[in-house]
Amino acid sequence: EPEVTQTPSHQVTQMGQEVILRCVPISNHLYFYWYRQILGQKVEFLVSFYNNEISEKSEIFDDQFSVERPDGSNFTLKIRSTKLEDSAMYFCASRLALTLTGELFFGEGSRLTVL
Amino acid sequence: GQQVMQIPQYQHVQEGEDFTTYCNSSTTLSNIQWYKQRPGGHPVFLIQLVKSGEVKKQKRLTFQFGEAKKNSSLHITATQTTDVGTYFCAGWGSNSGGSNYKLTFGKGTLLTVNP
């Protein structure tokens, strides 16, 4: 069964460092998302991406964050200068474009720990 | 912006007891989805409800969508230890509110089952 894959599964970084989280969405999906989940809390929307541009972003997704689809298969989330409060599980998700709204397929997540 | 509220936050039951979680949106939803996240796992899609007043069943799980398309519930009959996890409702917006590019999650209900 097709799945969304994410790397790395866990990354530890120092505050102020840049981090890139990578995702390979399901191959025929056209909408891509990043969500984050602080331990034990809700799944928070960060950004949606379609047709090589951001469709919508949340207040969390400030100038420190950026997304890119560099090669037609990978979908990356970059945090330029990490803060302690960026420590969380980051989930990538994708969906088909058959309907305007549909189910999201989530990857297993990348756990980011900022020291 | 659109808010999705979910209660209770936690529910502990004895195996065999029933369980219900409730979800309310601040805006009318085009559809509502339910996801399950096992401890340490990622959200996995369970079901989508689209029509006003819709009821769907999956074995011991019953899902309802309110007449006004602003609330929903998930009921599990005779819980089993395999039901343990966090159950999230999530809603796409509609023309009257919310966003068609963002799936907003409730805070989730953590279900634990005592064998």
Image (cartoon, coloured by chain):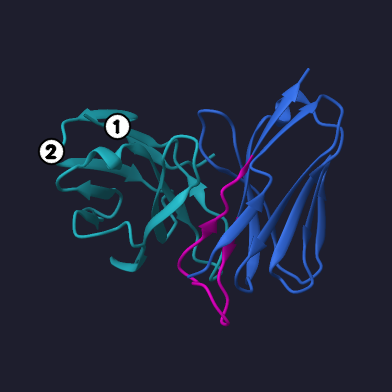
Give the colour of chain B.
blue
Q: Which chain is tinted cyan? A: A
Magenta segment includes B88 = no
Number of the label disc, if any, that sits on residue A8: 1
Q: Is residue B82 visible?
A: yes
Q: Residue furthest bottom?
A: B96
> Mark 2, chain letter?
A
Secondary structure mostly taken by the magenta-highlighted segment of the chain? loop
Relative horizontal placement of residue A58, taking residue B14 as reference (left or right): left
* Label pair 2/1, CB-CB below 8 angstroms: no
Residue A114, disc: none
Label for residue A17? 2
- Kindly identify which chain the residue marked by label 1 belongs to: A
Callout 2, which amino acid?
Gln
For image coordinates 28% across by 42% down, the residue present is A86
Residue B43 spot, x, y in % from top left: 54, 42
